[in-house]
Amino acid sequence: MSTFKDNSGREWNVNLDGPTIREVRKACGIDLAAVDGSASEKLRDDPVLLVDSLWVICRAQAQAVRVTDSDFGKSLVGDAIEFATEALIEAINDFFPSRRRAALKTLTARMRETREAGMEDALETLTNPELQTRIRTAMKEKAQKEIDNLLIQLSSATGLPAQSVSAST
């Protein structure tokens, strides 16, 4: 059984069966049983869809402890979204028979590895001081071109010769 904790410290069980998957399809428009794995990516890309889907799945538990759908959603922000996503994806994988489950778990692991490597690469690129220098240079060049274009337009409108300020910067 998959579980996650929300930001209020409440633990939620994520169990999937046919009727629950059908209810999520109807309420949220996502097919958690899609064999192509598209549900996992949709849930990762759209945290609101994730929260709505989890509400349908956990609604009976929430109502038993008098948690409203709004309170439930408000408790799923930040890292709790990641924990909830992993729990739901694990529950999706566990729904299927063993052969398909094994393939889905392998696919899920590879996708996680690829996503983490991509995030590391992005962070490395974004924290590279050379990137900031390149961005500032590009911004200066663009600003200079815009200033020069404005001076040319002003020159044609007034009949005065255009003077570039690029030599003085």
Image (cartoon, rainbow, N blue to C red):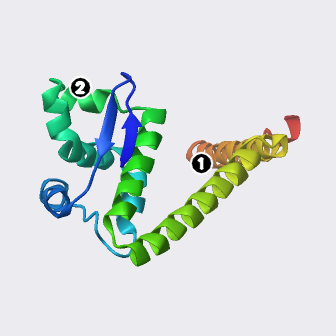
- Tell me what residue is drawn at x 79 percent, y 47 percent: 134
First of labels 1, 2 by sequence position:
2
The crowding category of the residue bearing disc 1, from other C-alpha atoms within 10 Å (few below 14, some 14 to 19, many at least 20), is: few
Q: Quadrant of residue 76?
A: top left
Tell me which amino acid carries mark 2. Asp
Q: Quadrant of residue 3?
A: top left
Rendering coords of residue 38 (x, y %): 38, 68
Q: Which residue is mark 1?
A: 153
Q: Which residue is mark 2?
A: 71
**Residue 138 visible from this viewpoint:** no
Rendering coords of residue 167 (x, y %): 87, 41
The crowding category of the residue bearing disc 2, from other C-alpha atoms within 10 Å (few below 14, some 14 to 19, many at least 20), is: few
Tell me which amino acid carries mark 1. Gln
Relative horizontal placement of residue 87, taking residue 18 as reference (left or right) = right
- Tell me what residue is drawn at x 36 percent, y 51 percent: 88
In this picture, is 129 found above or below 46?
above
